[in-house]
Amino acid sequence: MKKSVVSFVLVSALYSQFTVASGPSQLEHKERLEEQVLVSSSGVATPIRQVGTSVSIITHEDIALRGYQSLSEILRTQVGIAASNSGGRGKATALRIRGEEGFRTLVKIDGVDISDPTGVQIGPQIQHLLASDDIEKVEVLRGPQGFIYGADAGGVINIFTRSGKQQAQGKVSAEYGRFDSTALNAYITSGNDVGDIFVAITDQRSEGFNTSETDLSNDNDGYDNTTLHTKLGWNIQPSWRAQLVVRNVEAENEFDNCSFRDSSGSFVGTNQCLGEFDQLTARGSLAYTGEAMSHSLAYSYTDIERNNIALGSINTFATEGGIDKLEYLGRLDLADQLTLVVGSDFQSQSIDTGTSQDRDQLGVFGEVQLALADSVFVTAGARHDDNDDFGEHTSVRLSGAYIYTLNADAYLKARSSYGTGFRAPSLFEVSYNASDNAFGEAAATVLKEENSAGYDVAFEYHNSALGLSFELTYFDQQVEDEIFFDNSAFSGYLQDDGKTVSEGIEFATEYNVLPILAIVANYTYNDTELAERNQMAASGDTITNIQRRRRPQNIANVGLNFSLLENKLNLLFNLRSSRNAIERNGDTVVALDDYEVLDVSARYRITNNLVINARVENANDEDYREVLGFNTSGSAVYAGIKYQF
C-alpha cells in the first residue's frame, strides 16, 4: 500500500553495537509530581505544578503494566474519559472526554495530527491507535481549553514516542491470546550529539468474535493492523534541531451489516464486510530553543484512503482525503515572571468521494503567562480563525492556579480555567445534505458553525512523603447549535438552536498505602442533556430531559497495584464500572447495560532485559453492551514476552 517503504528504508541506517539497558523500577520511573513537565496545556514545556487546566499524564510504565493492545483501553481508565466500542478490537470506537463527541478530541503523535479528513466529522480513528512499547508518555488535556491546537479541540490527547539515545537500544515483544490474537512489536533507536533515529513497527492480528447480535451465523469478525513509526532528529547546533516524523497505518477490519446494489438495482445486505484503512502522516519541523525564547516551524501532511468491500470483491464505499498544515509556535520570556506564547497555523482539508471538495482555515493566537511569587500562575489567551466557508471567529481561554505550600513535601492547589471555541460543519456533513441522499428538512437545512464554552474549578492535594495525591474537579461545558444526524427519519444532518450541556464532577487519587501496594482510583459523574430540538428528534414531540447517548452518568476505576519480590513482580487489578447510559433506536430511548469489568495484569522481570507478562481481560466474564446491537468480549487470557537490548 502507500509509501510504508519509507520507514523500512530508514531501518538500514541503524547499525551499531547493542548494549544492555536495565529497566527502571516502577517507583524509579514515577517522577515526583511537582517535577513533571508537560506541553499540552499551552504548547510549551510547563511544570505541571503551575498549570491551571485539567491535565492527566500516562507514563510508559502505566501502559506497560496494564498491557492492553489498544490505546483506547488505556485511556478509558483515566478520569473524565468514557469509551464505546462496536464489537471488539479495531471496530468503531468513540472516546469521549467529559461527555463530548469523540470527533471533538484532537489526537497528536510526536506533533502529528492523526485526524481523519474522510470521517463524518474529521475525528481521529481511535480504534486503530495501538498501545505499543514505543510510547513514552501520553498527556490528556480535558475540556474545550485547547485553543493552541484549534478552536474545535474539545480535548487533546498528546502522545510522545521515545527519542533517540546516545547508545543503540531496542526492544522486541510478542503476545498471544484468545481469539487467536497475536501482537508483535519492535523498536530500535540510536543517536549521538549530531542526531538520532527511532524506528518502530507493530503488527496485531486477531480472528475476533461475532460483532453483531443480528448475525445468526456467529462468524468471527477479525482485525489486522500494521503500524510503522519513524522519527529522525538532527541537532544542527546546540540551539537548533530539525525533526522528521513519518507514520503509516494499514488496517483491515471485518464487520457485519453492509449493503450494496445488485445488477437489478435492488439493495442486498450481507455480513461478509471488510473495511480497509490506510493512513500516512508526516511532519517536518525546525526548532530553535534559547534561554529567553523559542521558535518552531512545522509542516505536516495526512493522506487517508478508506474502502469497504462486500463479499470479497464488491466495493461499497471508497473515499480519500488529505490535510496539509503549516504551523508556527513561539515563546518569549518578557521578564522572569512573564512569558508570551504566540503562534499561527494554516490548514487545508480535502476529500474525494467521487466529487472533490476542499477548504482552508487560517488561525492566529497568543497567550500571556504570569507567575507571581511562585504561588500564583495566570494565563490569558485568544485565538482568531478565518474559515473559507464560515467566516471569522474569535476564541478565548483563561486559566489560573494558586499554590499553598504546607511543608517541604506537601502543598494544596486551587485551579480554574475557562475556554470557548467553534467548529465549522465538516465537508462531509455539508456534502451529505447537498446530495441525493438527503431529503425533507435536512435537504433544506443550511448548516452553520457550532459554538462551545466550558469552565472547570478544581482543588488538589499532593504529599510526596506520604505518596498521596488527589484532585476534585467540577466542570460545565455547553455546545450551542449542535449538528446531529436525524435518527428518526434518517433524512440527513439537522441543527439545534439551543444548548447541549455536559457537566459533572471528577475525582482522582493515588496513594502508596504500603511500600508494595498503591491504590489508583478515579470517579466521574457526568450529567448530560440534549438541546430541545434534538430531544424532540429522540422522543417524538414530547420534551424530556434526555441525556446524550452512550454517555454513562457514572464511570469509575479502582486499581490495586502490587510491587513484589523487590519490584521484579508487578500485579495490577483494575475494576472498571459504568452506569446509567442510554442509547437511541430511532425514536426510542433504550437503557444500556450497567456493568463492572475486572482486568488483571501481571509482569515478571526475569533479568534486567527479559520480561514475561500475562493479562486477563474481563476476568469476571461480564455480559454487557456498550453500543446497542453489538457484542463485547467475555473473559480473555493473553501472555507474552519482551526482550530489551
Image (cartoon, rainbow, N blue to C red):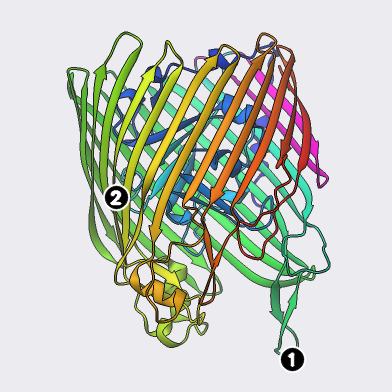
* Label 2 – label 1 distance at C-alpha: 52 Å
Q: Main secondary structure of the magenta part?
A: strand
Q: Residues within 10 Å of mark 2 (few under 14, many from 20)?
A: many
Q: Secondary structure at mark 1?
A: loop
Q: In percent of the image, x 29 and y 69: which residue is there?
A: 498
Q: Residue furthest bottom?
A: 264
> Percent x, y for residue 467?
46, 16
Relative to 342, say whether 513 is above or below: above
Q: Earlier in the sequence, mark 2 or mark 1?
A: 1
Relative to 95, say whether 276 is above or below: below
Q: Which residues are magenta?
A: 167-193
The image quadrant that residue 460 belongs to is top left
- Residue designated by label 2: 454
Q: In percent of the image, x 34 and y 78: which residue is there?
A: 446
> Percent x, y for residue 371?
19, 24
Residue nearer the viewer, 203 or 547 = 547
- Residue designated by label 1: 264
Residue nearer the viewer, 509 or 123 = 509
The reply, left or right, for residue 52 in relation to residue 97 is left
> Percent x, y for residue 51?
31, 30
Question: Looking at the picture, which amino acid does disc 2 mark?
Answer: Gly
> Percent x, y for residue 100?
42, 54
- In the rendered image, which quarter contains the C terminus? top right
The reply, left or right, for residue 258 in relation to residue 493 is right
Q: Secondary structure at mark 2?
A: strand
Question: Looking at the picture, which amino acid does disc 1 mark?
Answer: Ser
